Amino acid sequence: MYNGKVVICGVDTSKLPLLKEAEKEDLIKRAKKGEQAARNELINGNLRLVLSVVKRFWGRGENPDDLFQIGCIGLIKSIDNFDINQNVKFSTYAVPMIIGEIRRYLRDNNSVKVSRCIKDNAYKVMKAKEEFTAKNGCEPNVSQIAEMLNIPREDVVVALESSVEPISLYEPVFSENGDSFYVLDQIGDKNDCRNWLYEIAIRDAVSKLSARERTILNLRFMKGKTQMEVSKKIGISQAQVSRLEKNAINKIKS
């Protein structure tokens, strides 16, 4: 990306043509009749649509060129499967198809391994969503998908979750005036007031203490021993226990 232009797969997207709705309808009708030239023109005229969808998935460690190519596959499938008799705009039908194709790619290349059974269900669920969207012009809810596939709602939820690619804790979800709000900032534990990342930080800090300091903290705060009891157990004075305990706590805080 440079000077406001996006160059992807060697294509300067700022120079891509924009088709009017009437032109799209005409090209779709001609493509359905087998005119290859009309089909190619329709593909080129909708590459900006692919780019707009691909941008949603940028910043997740995937190669933009790969995502764009996968998105183009979704576009081609949209053209081939679009029903001109339905009262739905082509872009309304194509966007979910392109998103679905990219999500399938990300799911299959996901670093988090998913069982074959769940993958199969995810494929069926995504296909059912695409068919429902093409027919009704809106996405189905979980109950509708479950009814279409005759499977439990819980299986639909698991299948949908399995197709969601992992994201970085430091991925920005909102930016304004140079300040960003990250996924990390949204993490919380509703069961209690402790933040699990805070706990990880404490564990890391404790691991860097000396063996004696860890023993003192364990006896004092895990076993509930007094400083005098600790001093007798490890063979040093109560004053030394107090000093080591204080130093250890300061190390953790820092």
Image (cartoon, helix red, strand yellow):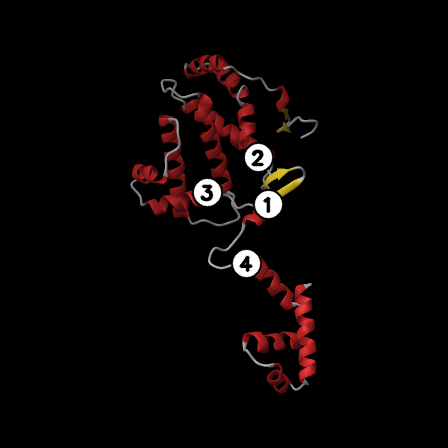
Q: Quadrant of the N terminus?
A: top right
Residue assigned mark 2: 66
**Residue named by callout 1:** 182
| Residue located 45% across and 49% down the image | 114
Quarter of the image with the C terminus is bottom right
Residue 196, labelled with which disc? 4
Residue 182 seen in this snapshot: yes
Q: Amino acid at mark 3?
A: Ser
Task: Determine the image quadrant of residue 8.
Answer: top right
**x 47%, y 38%: residue:** 104
Give the secondary structure at mark 1: strand
Q: Amino acid at mark 2?
A: Asp
Question: Reading the chain from its start, which is encountered first: label 3 or label 2?
Answer: 2
Q: Nearer the viewer, mark 2 or mark 4?
A: 4
The answer for how far apart the CA atoms under marks 2 and 1 are is 26 Å
Residue type (three-letter) at the residue carrying disc 1: Tyr
Whether pointer 3 and pointer 2 mark residues with C-beta atoms closer than 8 Å, the reply is no
Type of amino acid under label 4: Trp
